[in-house]
Image (tube, rainbow, N blue to C red):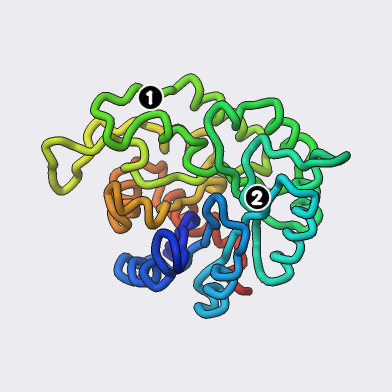
Amino acid sequence: MAVVDTHCHASPYWFEPVEVLVNEMDQNGVDKAVLIQFRGVFDNTYMIDCVGRYPGRFSMVAIVDTETDQAPQRLEEWVNRGAEGVRLGPAVRSPGEDAMAIWRKAAELGIVVSSLGTLKEFVSPEFDEVLNEFPNLTVIIEHLGGVGAYFGGSQSAPQVPYDEYHKVLTLARYSNTYMKIPGLGEFCPRPMPFRQPMPFADIPPLIEQAVEAFGPQRLMWGSDFPPVAAREGYGNALRFPRDHVRFPSEEDKEWVFGKTAEGIFRFGK
């Protein structure tokens, strides 16, 4: 099956340049990836160039400064240059008379919205309003809805916020919503002492619950390169969920780790 990584960052002046990502992809059998602009950067030129330098290998999602009234125009300019999506917070609103202007422009352009937020933001009235008003806009919820921000990492005794997480999973009722699943290190504490070949024990069933709520055809894997290097590492972020999380079938796994993303992103086609 083709393996697609839907959540990577690359930059010549922060994180790592794209060549480092390409090497990780080649070493771990990842065929394609989606470059996601990181917060605070509104110049998407580097990622546009990366897409052109590696034909068929990358798609990219831009960021625009949504606090300015020029954001919709800037978004259209980036899309004309090759962006396939925009990264927006769940509760983002535009200045001026049309508070939904940036969301409206994304819907008009027929692009994807990759949404970064907290569990609370994803179940907010503001996000619900977006999903109701733009039912044909593809919205991808990043990082399992932000559940990993509340526990995991270096914490030794995570308390999984299941009540809040389950509320986020109810967003599956909107047929235009999708969700990204990360590597296990994003929501599992680092094991002490370290074990092999599978270091994580007592894995919270967050991915399994996402599969049950959204179905595999609305889930996609994303490594979070290169921050993942400070957790379990790129290859493990792929192998551990692919090989140790229970999916209903091999076909379901193929959707999550490649086919869903290939149906949403063009990768230069």
Residue corresponding to mark 1: 160
Relative vertical location of residue 13 with respect to residue 185 in this rendering, above or below: below
- Nearest the viewer among 80 and 56 is 80
Q: Pointer 1: residues within 10 angstroms few (<14), some, or many (20+)?
A: some
- Nearest the viewer among 125 and 213 is 125
Q: Pointer 2: residues within 10 angstroms few (<14), some, or many (20+)?
A: many
Q: Position of residue 35 (x, y in %)?
A: 52, 62
- Nearest the viewer among 127 and 197 is 127
SS state under label 2: strand
- Marking on residue 77: none
- In this rendering, would 124 be left or right of 231? right
Occupied quadrant, residue 214: top right
Query: Is residue 109 visible in the rendered structure shown here?
Result: yes
Dot 2 amino acid type: Val
Dot 1 amino acid type: Val
Which residue shows up at 56% across the image and 75% down it?
Answer: 49
Relative vertical location of residue 23 with respect to residue 240 in this rendering, above or below: below
Which residue shows up at 62% across the image and 32% down it?
Answer: 171
Residue corresponding to mark 2: 113
Q: Quadrant of the C terminus?
A: bottom right
SS state under label 1: loop
Q: Position of residue 263 (x, y in %)?
A: 60, 59
Relative vertical location of residue 105 with respect to residue 91 in this rendering, above or below: below
* Residue found at the very far right of the displayed protein: 97
- Nearest the viewer among 98 and 165 is 98
- In this rendering, would 132 be left or right of 12? right
3D distance between C-alphas at marks 2 and 1? 27 Å
- Of labels 2 and 1, earlier in sequence is 2
